[in-house]
Image: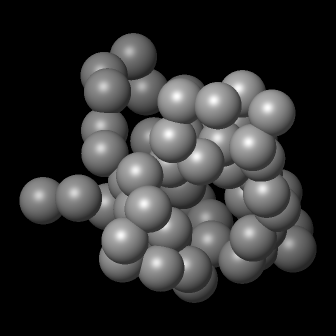
Amino acid sequence: MEATRAKQIYESKQTIGVQLDGEKQVWIESVDEANGMATVQVGSDPLNTHTVSVDRLKEET
């Protein structure tokens, strides 16, 4: 995924499914477009957050 798309998903009022490494459901919490990074929450645990490259994120179809 590109950083611009990750930011669009983050700012969207719709719920858009995103997966980390094609397996874990995540919620985008913030996007750093300049560095191509995103902070995501894994599953439903608000304490389980990771900062990852947006390349690892995939929009569910």
Q: How is the image coloured?
A: one colour
Give above or below for 5 relative to 58.
above
Res. 10 visible in picture: no
Q: How many marks?
A: 0
Give residue 28's position: percent from left, percent from top. 60, 43
Give above or below for 43 relative to 2.
above
> Which residue corresponds to the image point at 57% horizontal and 83% vertical from the top-left?
55
Q: Quadrant of the C terminus?
A: bottom left
Q: In the figure, is residue 41 to the left or right of 5?
A: right
> Which residue corresponds to the image point at 72% horizontal and 27% vertical from the top-left?
46
Report which quarter residue 23 is drawn in.
bottom left
Give residue 18's position: percent from left, percent from top. 39, 54
Res. 20 visible in picture: yes
Give above or below for 43 relative to 13.
below
Give residue 34's position: percent from left, percent from top. 86, 68
Report which quarter residue 11 is drawn in.
top right
Q: In the figure, is residue 51 to the left or right of 44?
A: right
Give above or below for 31 relative to 34.
above
Residue positioned most to the top: 13
Along the line of sight, the residue nearer the viewer: 22 or 11: 22
Along the line of sight, the residue nearer the viewer: 57 or 6: 57
Q: In the figure, is residue 60 to the left or right of 32?
A: left
> Which residue corresponds to the image point at 64% horizontal and 31% vertical from the top-left?
45
